[in-house]
Image (cartoon, rainbow, N blue to C red):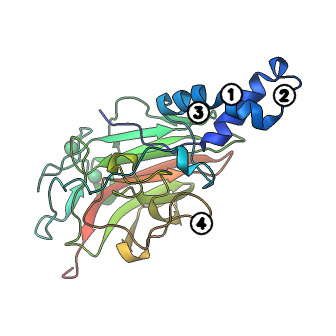
Amino acid sequence: MPPAVGPRYGQKRVLDRAISRASGVWFGYSTAMKRKYFAASVFLLSACAESTPPARTAENAETAPSVAATLPAALGKATCAAPNLDDLEDGDGRSLVTDDRGGYWYTYKDNAGSTVDPQGSFVPAEGGANGSKFAAHMQGKTADSGIVYVGLGFNLTDPMAPYDLSAAKGFCFQGKGKGPVRVKLPDVYTAPEGEQCKQCYNDFGVEFTLTEEWKEYCFDFAQLKQQGGWGEPKPALTTDHVFSIQWQVSANATEFDVFIDDVRLACDAQ
Ligand SMILES: [Ca+2]
Ligand SMILES: [Ca+2]
């Protein structure tokens, strides 16, 4: 099933947290000395943590894994003859199997106390767009403080691999519910699975606000931006090496109720 998809803290942040926990033992030592002593254990801690929060500074880039020299090959290529990514109508947790696609839906969340339902195995919810039977759904509440994130998404392929969406100009989906949402597309330069980024998870995306009624949202790939102030800035989404599509809520203390349906590629001919 799906790999870890959440963002991570910077190592310094984790380090300082570990130092803080052990402060009673460290009386008389400078913070710099404590950081140095803790470095090895914190490296292990950050390497093993499945959903540690995002790197928001560049100061510890030199401690991150080395960058791979070449991009991994795309597993498949979308065509505009088969633009549908998923309509959930078969009632299972796998996106539409066509053009080498067919990755699985999942939800994910931080370790700061946010809640999300469903969690674990994904089952489509009843009540889809345009009178259809099923949609993808998540609901819950984000934690009051800390760096929070919850999300719903699917990988384009299974096993998870880069996939070529460059035949399309963008994508569309139906959405309804409650909450500020960022739809984002982890690509080969922003997802750790691409083996290119040292400070990953600042994916190209765009914010929108859901309404109570179903509505179609369409975005060109060229509209998608990274967030400012963290991660590794890139000029644009690498449309021929995309891993996933995710709908994420990142505001603190926010109740969310997100329904997504009829996810498809948008092509010039449409
Ligand atoms: Ca399915
Ligand atoms: Ca549906």
Q: Amino acid at mark 3?
A: Asn
| Mark 3 surroundings: few (<14), some (14-19) or many (≥20) residues within 10 A | some
Residue picked out by circle 3: 111
Mark 3 and mark 2 residues within 8 Å of each other at the beta carbon: no
Q: Amino acid at mark 4?
A: Gly
Q: Amino acid at mark 1?
A: Tyr
Question: Which element type, helix, strand or loop, lies under badge 3?
Answer: loop
Q: CA distance from mark 1 to mark 3?
A: 26 Å
- Tell me which residue sits at (52%, 65%) in the image: 207
Image quarter for residue 167?
bottom left
The spot of residue 251 in percent (x, y) is 64, 52
Mark 1 and mark 2 residues within 8 Å of each other at the beta carbon: yes
Question: Which element type, helix, strand or loop, lies under badge 1?
Answer: helix
Q: Which mark is residue 228?
A: 4
Mark 4 and mark 3 residues within 8 Å of each other at the beta carbon: no
Q: Which quarter shows the N terminus?
A: top left
| Residue 207 vertical placement versus 249 (above, below) | below
For the residue pair 47 and 238, the one nearer the viewer reads as 47
Mark 4 and mark 2 residues within 8 Å of each other at the beta carbon: no
Residue picked out by circle 1: 37
- Tell me which residue sits at (40%, 47%) in the image: 192
Residue picked out by circle 2: 29
**Precedes in sequence: disc 4 or disc 3:** 3
For the residue pair 6 and 208, the one nearer the viewer reads as 6
For the residue pair 178 and 205, the one nearer the viewer reads as 205
**Precedes in sequence: disc 1 or disc 3:** 1
